């Protein structure tokens, strides 16, 4: 027991220092994500399950829902069936719902197969894109307009109704802009 005492002491001191400083990664991630609102979304290229590369810039002209998720995240797993449904239902309206696995690609593919879900999911195994977007805390969703500008971001599980509302808000704004330009 005595030979473990220094290790235990280091752990206790580290935990106390962490708690005393109240170091919280959530505000930093939130600040990064929210700093993107009103800005062009950072472009990226990620592979899908078939190994094809999908580039965000190729989705210009569509409303884009980027939903960062991981297999170890219970709210993310709960969100996936709804995202799969929305992907199929909203595609004809020019909306791309794109889940991005912030996880090991093999684990993510296995999870989707086990749950019999077949969404177009992208894989960010090294978390480069997740860090770029401040999606270090999950689930994190970004809504982009047809010009690729980040309109909003949401931390936590989004219901299908929440996603639909966000899309409808963009569609309404587009219609209002069109009416103004028409008159």
Image (cartoon, helix red, strand yellow):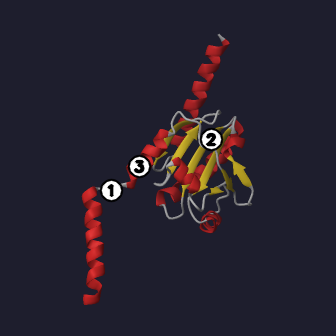
Say if mark 1 contacts mark 3, CB within 8 Å: no
CA separation in Å, label 1 and label 3: 10 Å
What numbered label is drawn on residue 28?
Answer: 3
SS assignment at label 2: strand
Answer with mark 1 or mark 3, whichever residue precedes in sequence: 1
Asked if residue 1 can be seen in this view, the reply is: no
For the point 56% across and 40% down, which residue is it?
143
Local secondary structure at mark 3? helix
Residue 32's spot in the image, x, y percent?
46, 45
Residue 48 sits in quarter: bottom right
- Tell me where residue 22 appears, x and y as whole percent: 29, 56
**Dot 1 crowding, Cα within 10 Å, few <14, some 14–19, many 20+:** few
User: Which residue carries the number 2 mark?
Assistant: 64
- Tell me which numbered mark, 3 or 2, is placed earlier along the sequence: 3
Quadrant where the C terminus is found in the figure: top right
Give the residue drawn at x 72%, y 42%: 58
**Residue annotated with mark 1:** 23
Q: Position of residue 138 (x, y in %)?
A: 48, 54
State which quadrant residue 176 falls in.
top right
Q: Earlier in the sequence, mark 1 or mark 2?
A: 1
Q: Residue at x 73, y 60 (%)?
A: 51
Q: Relative to 135, is 41 on the left or the right?
A: right
């Amino acid at each position: 027991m005595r030979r473990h005492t220094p290790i235990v002491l280091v752990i206790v001191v580290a935990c106390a220092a962490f708690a005393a400083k109240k170091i919280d990664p959530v505000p930093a991630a939130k600040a990064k994500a929210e700093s993107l609102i009103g800005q062009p979304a950072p472009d990226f290229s990620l592979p899908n399950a078939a190994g094809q590369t999908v580039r965000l810039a190729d989705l210009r002209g569509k409303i884009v829902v980027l939903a960062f998720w991981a297999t170890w995240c219970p709210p993310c797993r709960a969100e996936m069936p709804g995202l799969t449904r929305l992907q199929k239902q909203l595609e004809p309206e020019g909306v791309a719902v794109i889940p991005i696995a912030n996880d090991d690609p093999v684990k993510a593919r296995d999870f989707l197969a086990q749950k019999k879900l077949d969404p177009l999911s992208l894989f960010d195994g090294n978390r480069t894109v997740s860090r770029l977007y401040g999606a270090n805390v999950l689930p994190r969703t970004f809504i982009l307009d047809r010009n690729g500008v980040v309109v909003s971001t949401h931390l936590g599980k989004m219901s299908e109704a929440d996603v639909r509302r966000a899309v409808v808000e963009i569609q309404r704004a587009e219609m209002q802009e069109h009416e103004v330009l028409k008159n």
